[in-house]
Amino acid sequence: MGQSTLLPLGCDADSNADTIANALLDTSVRDTTVLITGVGVHNKRPNICWEVARILAKHGVTVCITSRTAKKAKALARSLQLALDKEDSETPSENLRPRGRIIGISKALDLSSADSVYDFVDEWDRHGLECVDRLILGAGLGLVPGRQRTTDRIDANFAVNHLGHFLLTNLMLDALRASKAFRVVVLGSEMHRGIPGTDPIELDLEDINCEEYTDDWEAHPPCGQAAYMSYARSKLCNVLFARQFAKNLTNLRKWAPWKGTSSVVVVDPGLTVRTGLTRHVPVTPGSKAGERNRAILTRTYSRKNNPRARSVRQAAGDVILAAFAPTLQPSSVYEEMVKEGPLPRSGKNEDVQSGGTPFWYLRERDVSDPSEAALDDEAAQDLWEFSCDLVGLK
Ligand SMILES: NC(=O)c1ccc[n+]([C@@H]2O[C@H](COP(=O)([O-])OP(=O)(O)OC[C@H]3O[C@@H](n4cnc5c(N)ncnc54)[C@H](OP(=O)(O)O)[C@@H]3O)[C@@H](O)[C@H]2O)c1
């Protein structure tokens, strides 16, 4: 991989999030507020968004933590405070900068339920919380065998990974608009392309529950075709949603205060070990299929066995880059990129040069192209309308 145009000096493809943040974030980030979904700890191990939250708070950003229950959001905020206190006591000389506030939002945000998202945003508005400069959409359900459905009978991956975030972003628009330069960052995945060796994935609104695929995980390890497809399709929806959202913002740009300052980014953090994403894969000890799954996970999600595998701290670095790299802002730096062209297709939003909102797809810490299916304008528009109907948005 060549040197990315996004990476700050002194950083490379393997730098961890602390190194990237030290090089990228200056004191101006102290005025920013980030709302983040998907902060979690599993088996006592912090996940990607927990690391993102820790580092941003360390650099003075106000970080608002959401979780499925208010109690959990508070507990996560406390765990972050404690981790930063520990760092301060261990390396006092390096921690002289003022820490940002860490707020565990006292209202549940269960992304599998539209009602919960509406209630959450009502509460946010009622409390007059700050404007949101960065909305980081990191919550996600991984490979879940057995056709998991929400209470509305919708595929759980589609609901949590796409629909809940779709609704949240739309409802937070006023809070975003209150920022002079907001950015929406979605944690996507290269899996939006599909399963290696099979046909590329396309949007299929006729079968969002993936009924056409088998959920027999013993025959199709580690989780069955249906689980794999539903995760992969939800990640395709992430890209289609982000592109359409950027396009919609561009169409509003004439009166928009964010003209020329805001952007929408999908970032693939790469295959990241030791998070909770594979926790639903059955690994029952003593069962042949369970043992086989364990072997698959050990082979894949291990930095020793898989050279592509990345640590949580590296993955968090990708997200911080996506959220704060100045190059992704349609500023003078961005205009230079446009002049130099040709831009990757993810940046080719025909209106951007006249003040529209760019959409970017990032992988391996650089701007890249998503799949052909993710660049399908008609599919993006169809998904938008379909999602509005499902959650009752006008
Ligand atoms: N790990 C990878 O290899 C990888 C690769 C590419 C992309 N990604 C993407 O990166 C993101 C973060 O993944 P991760 O690896 O850090 O996984 P993770 O540890 O499983 O984190 C996912 C988070 O989503 C939350 N969540 C799940 N269902 C929810 C719901 N209904 N409402 C609200 N929150 C919910 C979980 O909360 P609870 O703790 O309450 O369950 C958890 O905190 C995901 O979008 C994933 O698709 C990960």
Image: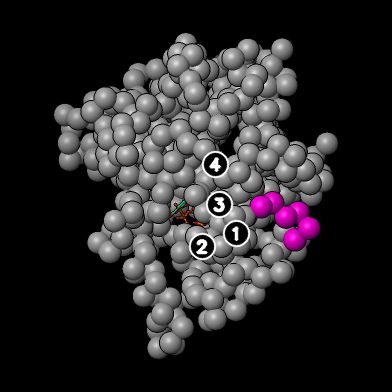
Mark 2 lies on a secondary structure that is: loop
Distance of mark 3 from mark 4, alpha carbons?
8 Å
Mark 3 lies on a secondary structure that is: helix
Query: Dot 2 surroundings within 10 Å: few (below 14), some, or many (20 or more)?
Result: few
Does label 3 or label 1 sit earlier along the sequence?
Answer: 3
Does label 3 or label 4 sit earlier along the sequence?
Answer: 3
| Residue 30 visible in the shown view | yes
Distance of mark 3 from mark 1, alpha carbons?
9 Å
Q: Which one is in front, 323 or 83? A: 323
Please provide the residue range marked out in magenta: 202-207
Could you tell me the amino acid type at mark 4?
Pro
Residue 377: image quadrant is: top right
Distance of mark 1 from mark 4, alpha carbons?
15 Å
Could you tell me the amino acid type at mark 3?
Arg
Q: Nearer the viewer, mark 4 or mark 2?
A: 2
Q: For mark 4, what is the residue? A: 370
Q: For mark 1, what is the residue? A: 199
Q: Quadrant of the N terminus?
A: top left
Could you tell me the amino acid type at mark 1?
Asp
For the residues bearing labels 3 and 4, Cβ distance under 8 angstroms: yes
Does label 1 or label 4 sit earlier along the sequence?
Answer: 1
Mark 1 lies on a secondary structure that is: loop
